């Protein structure tokens, strides 16, 4: 049996500090918090380090910067951004998306000025973070962002192809493409063979089948590919250029900016833009990955983008000052970090520590890596940046023109120029869609005129709309079909004025949606009775207000259910659907992932989403008469409740189950008045209510005290049975095998809840010890924080 005690959450509880006498009489003395690193973070940091080491060297090689600068950026990005970042599971470091920008800066201004530009870009990021504009950066069209990354990927791949063939890349993409035939004719077999081996291992390693493949995939493919190429080159004695890490005593640090002011400003803006957008989009992508992990606390599942922008700025300041490459959030390492099971930012910090250790202890080993192997690795990364999935997405959304222009702009002119072209084309496409409206007029065989409007109906289309509407003869029947998602005030007034004029001349007008389906009229100011959760019996929107005043609600007969259903659906489509359409579209793509199974009564007065302030996708709801949970194997002839429980626990992986009873429950009143007995001919309702007999027996036990509601006794035996039934059904839940397993693992919580309909008051039952004692249902109010529900 379970006991229930009252629970409340005070301000001190929410802040984590004991208050008043509780601090002295009931709380142990505070102990200093110790820094602990979870085992999952330790293993994840090693996996990320093994990926970051070769990639950092390869990106430094691709930019033409000193090779050790890639290691500096990897260490700083891991330690600084991992320590103070707002996206704890995102890993920062030298990013492939910055390769083209950095290479151009080094060629134009030199390495020391490039480091100074990195520092200034970090300061600019700090300013943007203080202004809290991180969310605004996400307003850039995804087609522009994906096009920018694709253009950078093409640039990287073409440049590294020359090193793969044993040559040296030129300064621009067009020059590299022009010299490619000559480079192919003079390819060096040794460099080409090492590069081919690197690419083969890189592609084949993740595809090893069977059990061996599962173990092999725990080691990053990039590390295995570079290691295999290095060992092969050393074994065969191939004479190839290798990694050359100079002494740290001669490492170049940042200097004062040297160059034209406008050029430096443009360089800072470009670096800031690319670093910020890539980091923020990476944080959003990490949030999508962590949302699927139930083992993470809520704080780890949602990024603070403004704080992440501040952390990226601090990382760039430190990296540039120490002679490192620009830093940004990196998709490859972040994905590996999440998939490796990291649970906090400690994994990113530790990976930075491992990079520092490698630069100090593994220099002789790193200098055995052929440059051709690193070039092949970076070329593969560049090719992967041209994502077919992104191309399909922008094509489906009719933004392939924006994507193509941005990609070509980045390849031909540069990153900032390409992004500017992409934004301009995106704005032009949006204006074209807004202004493009197709209006047609035709007459069917019955003489009904159809005016069809395709596209957004704005003031720009009002002249054409008016001309078309006035082609409809006076007194004719007309259907106006609106196939668009937006109509501004000018178009609305023009349509309404014509409708009034046409109807006064004996005509009939019907406003319809797509396909001719009838749609509801726009809401008027007089429809003040319609609000969320308004009962159907209070919907009088299609009747004038003076009629409502003449006919009081108390004497008005109930409307037919069909009319109520039609009015309710129309109100939903008009008022609610536009607000929830995006969220429901996301749920349709990703599937349901509720965190709670909510088992309650079928009573029409219980609106679960209202009393729990939940929305689509939050609750997996099971409703039945009396909120009963039949015991496993009970003679019921209906396994629907057990099936729902099993599906919620084993398939949906819900984290809690709530049994909610309510006042005035008809099932409990039926149990009290005429409890079902015997095995004779019982009605379906009587057979079902037999699962509530244990609750009736529990209440009748003289050795058990009656429950209380926030200190008061239940109003009558029916209310007492409603409370007792909640506790009894929680006991029945524990008997289900799937629930017992989840409780044993600590992956599931059970809650008891009671809702008083007349008071609109929710009560929570909480478990104190295994011995059944006084049942106390504690009232919940607005002062309680989210997550304050105590285990039942």
Image: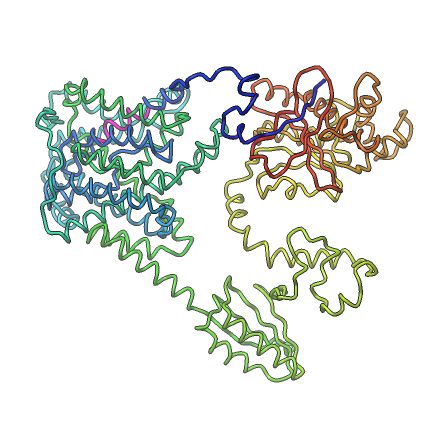
Instruction: Judge whether 207 appears above or below 613 on screen.
Output: above
Main SS type for the magenta part? Answer: helix
Q: Quadrant of the N terminus?
A: top right
Q: Quadrant of the C terminus?
A: top right
Residue 486 among those drawn in magenta: no
Q: Quadrant of residue 520?
A: bottom right
- In the image, what residue occupies the spot 65% across and 19% down? 768
- In the image, what residue occupies the spot 35% across and 42% down? 280
Instruction: Judge whether 517 appears above or below 447 on screen.
Output: above
Q: Position of residue 170 (x, y in %)?
A: 11, 44
Identify the magenta region.
47-56
Q: Quadrant of residue 570?
A: bottom right
Does 735 sit left or right of 107 as displayed? right
Instruction: Judge whether 414 appears above or below 223 on screen.
Output: below
Q: Nearer the viewer, residue 333 or 233?
A: 333
Q: Position of residue 351 (x, y in %)?
A: 30, 24
Counting labels gives 0
- In the image, what residue occupies the spot 30% across and 31% down? 203
Does 263 sit left or right of 311 as displayed? left
Q: Quadrant of residue 689?
A: top right
Scheme of image coloration: rainbow
Residue 51 among those drawn in magenta: yes
Does 455 sit left or right of 663 as displayed? left
Q: Position of residue 208 (x, y in %)?
A: 36, 25
Q: Position of residue 145 (x, y in %)?
A: 32, 48
């Amino acid at each position: 049996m379970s006991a229930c005690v009252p629970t409340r959450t005070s301000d001190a509880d929410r802040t984590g500090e004991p208050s008043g006498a509780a601090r002295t009489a009931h709380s142990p003395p505070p102990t200093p918090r110790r820094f602990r690193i979870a085992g999952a973070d330790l293993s994840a940091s090693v996996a990320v380090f093994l990926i970051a080491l070769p990639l950092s060297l390869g990106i430094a090689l691709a930019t033409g910067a000193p090779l050790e600068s890639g290691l500096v950026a990897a260490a700083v990005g891991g330690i600084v951004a991992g320590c103070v970042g707002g996206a704890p599971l995102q890993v920062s470091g030298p990013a492939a998306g910055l390769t083209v920008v950095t290479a151009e800066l080094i060629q134009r201004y030199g390495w020391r000025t490039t480091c100074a530009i990195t520092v200034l870009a970090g300061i600019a990021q700090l300013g943007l973070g203080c202004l809290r504009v991180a969310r605004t950066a996400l307003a850039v069209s995804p087609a522009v962002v994906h096009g920018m990354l694709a253009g950078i990927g093409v640039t990287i791949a073409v440049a590294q192809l020359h090193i793969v063939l044993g040559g040296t890349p030129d300064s621009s993409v067009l020059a590299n493409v022009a010299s490619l035939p000559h480079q192919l004719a003079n390819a060096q077999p040794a460099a080409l063979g090492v590069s081919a081996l690197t690419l083969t291992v890189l592609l084949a390693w993740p595809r090893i089948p069977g059990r061996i493949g599962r173990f092999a995939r725990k080691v990053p493919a990039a590390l295995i590919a570079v290691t295999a190429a290095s060992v092969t080159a050393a074994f065969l004695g191939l004479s190839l250029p290798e990694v050359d890490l100079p002494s740290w005593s001669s490492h170049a640090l940042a200097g004062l900016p040297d160059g034209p002011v406008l050029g430096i400003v443009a360089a800072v803006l470009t670096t800031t833009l690319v670093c910020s957008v890539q980091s923020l989009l990476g944080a959003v992508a990490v949030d999508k990955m962590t949302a699927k992990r139930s083992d993470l606390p809520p704080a780890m599942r949602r990024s603070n983008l403004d704080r992440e922008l501040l952390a990226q700025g601090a990382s760039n300041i430190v990296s540039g000052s120490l002679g490192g490459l620009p830093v940004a959030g990196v998709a490859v390492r972040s994905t590996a970090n999440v998939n490796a099971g990291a649970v906090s930012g400690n994994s990113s910090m530790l990976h930075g520590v491992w990079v520092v250790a490698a630069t100090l202890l593994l220099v002789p080993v790193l200098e055995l890596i052929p440059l051709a192997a690193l070039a092949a690795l970076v070329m593969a990364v560049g090719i992967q940046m041209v994502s077919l999935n992104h191309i399909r997405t922008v094509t489906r959304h009719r933004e392939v023109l924006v994507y193509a222009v941005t990609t070509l702009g980045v390849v031909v002119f540069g990153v900032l120029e390409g992004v500017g072209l992409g934004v301009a084309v995106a704005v032009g496409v949006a204006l074209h869609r807004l202004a493009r409206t197709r209006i047609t007029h035709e007459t069917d065989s019955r003489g009904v005129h159809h005016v069809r409007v395709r596209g957004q109906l704005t003031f720009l289309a009002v002249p054409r709309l008016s001309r078309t509407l006035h082609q409809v003869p006076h007194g004719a029947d007309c259907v106006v079909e609106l196939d668009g998602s937006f109509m501004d005030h000018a178009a609305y007034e023009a349509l309404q004025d014509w409708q009034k004029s046409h109807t006064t001349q004996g005509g009939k007008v019907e406003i319809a949606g797509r396909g001719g389906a009838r749609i509801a009229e726009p809401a008027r100011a007089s429809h003040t009775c319609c609000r969320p959760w308004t009962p159907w019996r209070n919907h009088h929107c299609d009747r004038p207000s003076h009629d409502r005043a003449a006919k009081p609600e108390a004497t008005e007969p109930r409307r037919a259910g069909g009319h109520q259903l039609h009015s309710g659906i129309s109100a939903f489509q008009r008022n609610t659907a536009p607000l929830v359409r995006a969220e429901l579209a996301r749920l349709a793509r990703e599937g349901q992932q509720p965190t709670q199974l909510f088992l309650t009564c079928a009573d029409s007065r219980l609106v679960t989403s209202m009393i729990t302030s939940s929305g689509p996708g939050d609750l997996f709801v099971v409703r039945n008469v009396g909120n009963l949970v039949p015991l496993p194997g009970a003679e019921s002839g209906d396994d629907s409740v057990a099936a729902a429980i099993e599906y919620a626990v084993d398939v949906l992986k819900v984290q809690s189950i709530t049994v909610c009873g309510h006042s005035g429950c008809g099932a409990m009143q039926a149990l009290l008045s005429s409890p079902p007995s015997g095995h004779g001919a019982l009605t379906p309702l009587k057979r079902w209510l037999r699962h509530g007999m244990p609750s009736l027996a529990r209440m009748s036990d003289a050795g058990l005290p009656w429950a209380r509601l926030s200190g008061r006794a239940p109003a009558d035996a029916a209310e007492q049975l409603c409370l007792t039934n909640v506790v009894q059904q929680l006991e029945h839940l524990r008997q289900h095998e799937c629930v017992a397993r989840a409780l044993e693992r600590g992956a599931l919580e059970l809650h008891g809840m009671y809702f008083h309909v007349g008071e609109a008051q929710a009560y929570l039952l909480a478990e104190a010890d295994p011995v059944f004692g006084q049942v106390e249902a504690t009232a919940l109010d607005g002062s309680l924080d989210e997550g304050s529900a105590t285990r039942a």
